[in-house]
Image (tube, rainbow, N blue to C red):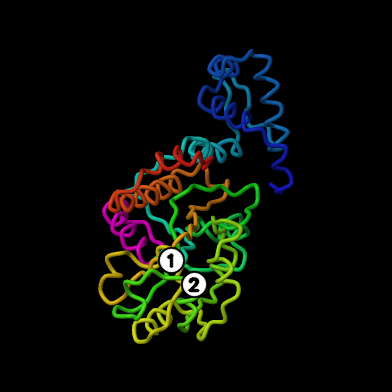
C-alpha cells in the first residue's frame, strides 16, 4: 500500500476484519462489535474497496475467506496487538529499565552533586546511563530537540515559555584562598581583597547568571570592574593556582563541598554587609512532562538535592518554596 493511502485506513476497519475472519458471518461479527448488521455490511464493502479484493465468498456453510483474506489473517493479530500496545499507558520499572539520559550540569555543581546521584541510580536503576556535559551553545534548543534531557545550573536571566524550572536552592558565591593566606581570619573589606591577584573563570556557564543582590551591591561592582591576573576556563587550573599562591578565586556558589574545603582551602567571608546569592534550578522542556522515565530521574535529582539540604541542616525544598513564596 502506498504510504499516501494510509490516510484512507480506519483502524475500525481492521477491528471489523478480525471479527469477520473469526466469525465468518456478518451478523455474528456485527453482534460482537455491538453494531447493526447493515453497518457491518457497509464496513465489509469498505474493506473490499480498501484491499481491492472480495475478501469473503458466500457459501451455504458460511463466508469463505479468499487467499488475500487468509494472508491478512496471518498478520492482523500482530498489527492490532502492536496498536494496542501503543495506546496502553507506559509502564516503567527502574530496576529493569535501560536507557541513556543527557544532562548539562555546571562544572562546579557536578563536583558535589553527581557522585551522590550516580550512587543512588546504581542502586535504584542500574540500567540508566548518564552522559554529562558542562556547557551547551543553546540550552533551550538542546532541551527542545531532545539533545538534552535536563540541566542543573544557576538560574539565568530568562527562559523560553516552554521551559520548566524547579528550584534546588540558594547559595552565596565563595571567595576561595589557600590555608594560611594573609587575609585568613580578618574582617574583610573590598579594598583589602583588591590588594591580591585574582583568578577569574571565563566559562560561558557563569556569563548570564542571575545574582540576587541589592542594585548597589559592592560584589557586583567588584566583579564587573576587577581586572584578573589570570583568566581560565578550567576549574581545576583555577583551584590549583589558588592552592599554591596568594591568588584569590571568586568561585561560583557550591564550587566544592564544605568538607572538601577543609583540606587545604578556606572560604573567606565576603565583606560585612554584603548579601548576595544565586538560585540553582533544575531545567527541563515541557515535552518530557509525561515520560515516566524522565519523571523518575527528575525525582531522583530532587531527592539527591534533599539529601544535601538535610546534610547541611537546610529547609526542605517544600519549606524553601513556602518561605520564599516561590512559584517553582
Q: Is residue 26 left or right of residue 5?
A: left
Q: Report if residue 118 lies within the magenta region.
A: yes
Q: Position of residue 68 (x, y in %)?
A: 61, 39
Instruction: Please give the name of the residue rendered at 38% of the width and 81% of the height, measured from the top-left corner.
Output: 242
Comparing 201 with 111, the one in front is 201
Judging by the rendered image, the residue that carries numbered circle 2 is 190
Q: Residues within 10 Å of mark 2 (few under 14, many from 20)?
A: few
Q: What is the magenta segment's predominant secondary structure?
A: helix
Q: Residues within 10 Å of mark 1 (few under 14, many from 20)?
A: many
Q: Is residue 153 left or right of residue 121?
A: right
> Which disc, if any, is residue 312?
none
**Is 30 above or below relative to 319?**
above
Comparing 172 with 66, the one in front is 172
Instruction: Please give the name of the residue rendered at 41% of the width and 62% of the height, measured from the top-left corner.
Output: 130
Mark 1–mark 2 Cα distance, whole angstroms, equals 9 Å
Q: Is residue 231 visible?
A: yes
Of labels 1 and 2, the one closer to you: 2
For the record, the magenta segment spans 111-130
Instruction: Please give the name of the residue rendered at 56% of the width and 67% of the height, measured from the top-left corner.
Output: 136
Q: Report if residue 93 lies within the magenta region.
A: no
Judging by the rendered image, the residue that carries numbered circle 1 is 270
Comparing 61 with 176, the one in front is 176
Q: Position of residue 112 (x, y in %)?
A: 35, 63
Instruction: Please give the name of the residue rendered at 52% of the width and 36% of the height, measured from the top-left corner.
Output: 87
Comparing 243 with 232, the one in front is 243
Point out the tag, 1 or 2, that comes first from the N-terminus: 2
**Is 13 above or below relative to 156?**
above
Q: Position of residue 177 (x, y in %)?
A: 37, 77
Q: Is residue 259 left or right of residue 106?
A: left
Amino acid at each position: 500500500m502506498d504510504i499516501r493511502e494510509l490516510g484512507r485506513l480506519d483502524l475500525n476497519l481492521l477491528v471489523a476484519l478480525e471479527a469477520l475472519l473469526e466469525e465468518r458471518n456478518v451478523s455474528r461479527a456485527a453482534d460482537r462489535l455491538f453494531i447493526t448488521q447493515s453497518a457491518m455490511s457497509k464496513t465489509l464493502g469498505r474493506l473490499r474497496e480498501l484491499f481491492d479484493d472480495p475478501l469473503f465468498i458466500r457459501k451455504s456453510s458460511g463466508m469463505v475467506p479468499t487467499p488475500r483474506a487468509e494472508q491478512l489473517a496471518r498478520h492482523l493479530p500482530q498489527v492490532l496487538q502492536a496498536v494496542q500496545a501503543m495506546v496502553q499507558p507506559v509502564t516503567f520499572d527502574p530496576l529493569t529499565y535501560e536507557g541513556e539520559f543527557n544532562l548539562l550540569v555546571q562544572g562546579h555543581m557536578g563536583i558535589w552533586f553527581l557522585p551522590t546521584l550516580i550512587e543512588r541510580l546504581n542502586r535504584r536503576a542500574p540500567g540508566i546511563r548518564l552522559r554529562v556535559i558542562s556547557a551547551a551553545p543553546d540550552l533551550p534548543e538542546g532541551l527542545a530537540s531532545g539533545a538534552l534531557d535536563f540541566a542543573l545550573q544557576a538560574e539565568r536571566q530568562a527562559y523560553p515559555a516552554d521551559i520548566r524550572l524547579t528550584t534546588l536552592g540558594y547559595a552565596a558565591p565563595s571567595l576561595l584562598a589557600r590555608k594560611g593566606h594573609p587575609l585568613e581570619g580578618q574582617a574583610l573589606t573590598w579594598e583589602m581583597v583588591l590588594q591580591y591577584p585574582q583568578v577569574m573563570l571565563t566559562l560561558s556557564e557563569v556569563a548570564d547568571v542571575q545574582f540576587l543582590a541589592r542594585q548597589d551591591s559592592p560584589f557586583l561592582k567588584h566583579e564587573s570592574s576587577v581586572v584578573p591576573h589570570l583568566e581560565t576556563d578550567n576549574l581545576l587550573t583555577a583551584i590549583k593556582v589558588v592552592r599554591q599562591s596568594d591568588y584569590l578565586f571568586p568561585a561560583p556558589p557550591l564550587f566544592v563541598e564544605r568538607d572538601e574545603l577543609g583540606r587545604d582551602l578556606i572560604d573567606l567571608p565576603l565583606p560585612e554587609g554584603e548579601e548576595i546569592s544565586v538560585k540553582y534550578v533544575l531545567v527541563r522542556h515541557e515535552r518530557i512532562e509525561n515520560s515516566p522515565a524522565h519523571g523518575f530521574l527528575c525525582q531522583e535529582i530532587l531527592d539527591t538535592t534533599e539529601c544535601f539540604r538535610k546534610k547541611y541542616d537546610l529547609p526542605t525544598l517544600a519549606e524553601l518554596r513556602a518561605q520564599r513564596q516561590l512559584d517553582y
